[in-house]
Image (cartoon, rainbow, N blue to C red):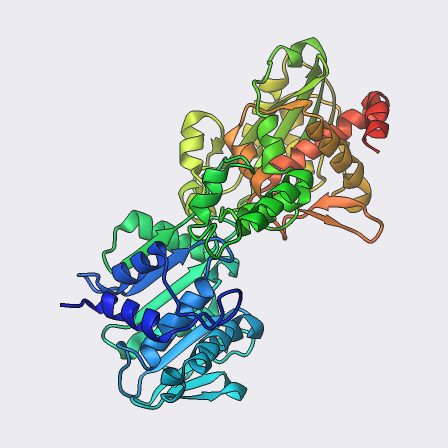
Amino acid sequence: METRGERVIRFIETFCRVPEGKFVGKPLKLEAFQRRFIIETFDNPAGTRRAYLSIARKNGKSALLAAIVMAFVVGPEKKLNAQVISGGRSREQAALVFKLASKMCMLNPALAGRVKIIPSSKTIIGIVANTEYRAISAEAGTAHGLSPLFAILDEVGQVRGPQDDFIEAIETAQGAYDAPILIAISTQAASDADLFSIWLDDAERASDPTIVSHVYAAPKDCDLDDREAWKAANPALGVFRSLEDVEAQAAKAARMPSAENGFRNLTLNQRVTRFTPFISPGVWKACGGDVDDSAFYEGDVYGGLDLSVTTDLTALVLIARKDGIWHVKPTFWTPEATLADRAHRDRAPYQDWARAGFLKATPGSAVEYDFVARDIAEMTAGMDVRKIAFDRYRMATLQRELDRADVSLPFEACGQGYVSMAPAIDATEIEFLHERVRHAGHPVLTMCAATAVMISDPAGNRKLDKSKSTGRIDGMVALAMAMGAAHGSGVEDELIPEIVALD
């Protein structure tokens, strides 16, 4: 006896045609990973409430969605007077599934005779059961007033942050049915704190039998030319996902650091931002060697201090050079009382890091600067500290505590605008690109590096921007200020030949 999932597959492969491309008009033959997704979604003994498919771009996800839509409109999943919707972030994105479904209908007379297509409202009516399918967008704000039996979300990974009013409206609208299904198909979101990441992580942790989750992604730290990693994220590779295109994209990413994150997100389906990173993952990894503590007691030491009160991290990064290599010693402070809440919100293991000594938790719900002052005094004892650049924010409070602790260090104010930060950013970037930095993979600093994003002014000056970043970047701000302090103290003279060599 045929199962529900098998009936859906048979309908798709019998009636649906390839809507565009090289094989346009040919019967749509599902790949093994597509069949598996359909079977597990529709033959779930617990009954599927949600189904997630996270996969790299150009692996036929939109065509798969369009075919499943048609199964609900005129196929084995049709229900009398039922509503079916697909949602996208933009009008263009929302229209994509509708256009593919319409083409499938027009390419097969057996389907064309059973539907009425209304392009103006991006609607397809299934004549037999009066089933209505509509494509809606967040831009149009058309989610309210609907009651869909089946809803699909395309590229929900583009949602930034943990919630979205448009998606919430769709979820709420499904409450009229006893067994509605929501399917979300998308590449990965930029960070753990974004909505689609939260959904995927919840599905993995909670073991809810009503949630089906299939994630095709390359290993986190894979090389750009790792062909097995390509296959992991692109199950249709060599079939309708062009191998030649992936090869070209990988070569471009290896050649141009600014293209790496886009390749990792869209082609390798990794959880990284597509914004231009300050330091690319590959460069950061290359500078992850051991830190030589003796450098901080044998030569000049420079620092950067980024202060906070409650939600951000307070960060001090000290750097010292030995044998042409900058060794990095970061220290982070954060309030103990809110540690668990912020760990959940930021989706970062702050408590584990605190226990391991990578993060200092100060008593109370705000950073206690007397603790910070004492720690700074203790860690800089015996060092020849030449300069510590600091952000003026809250510095007066810390200075009072430093005075009480009888700590005298060469602090120098550093603005956070383009004029002050651009030289520091340039110096930091050059040292990393030449692999003259060692940070030992400090986990908190690595988190900051992974989320730090640069912005530029019209003159090409650059700075780190917390508003554009997907997580905490305080450590990288402090590191850049430390590098700026060092190169502003005469070290830049030694850097000039290297800069010329890059041109």
**Left or right relative to 402: residue 367:** left
Q: Is residue 277 visible?
A: no
Q: Is residue 163 above or below residue 175?
A: above
Could you tell me which residue is drawn at 85 percent across and 50 percent down?
A: 459
**Residue furthest left as drawn:** 1
Could you tell me which residue is drawn at 67 percent across and 40 percent down?
A: 257
The mark tally for this picture is 0
Q: Is residue 85 above or below residue 388?
A: below
- Viewer-side residue, 493 vs 72: 72
Q: Position of residue 54 (x, y in %)?
A: 42, 55
Please state, as top left, top right, bottom left or bottom right, where the C terminus lies in the image: top right
Q: Is residue 180 above or below residue 304?
A: below
Which image quadrant is residue 395 in?
top right
Q: Position of residue 156 (x, y in %)?
A: 47, 62
Could you tell me which residue is drawn at 52 percent across and 60 percent down?
A: 158
Which image quadrant is residue 461 in?
top right
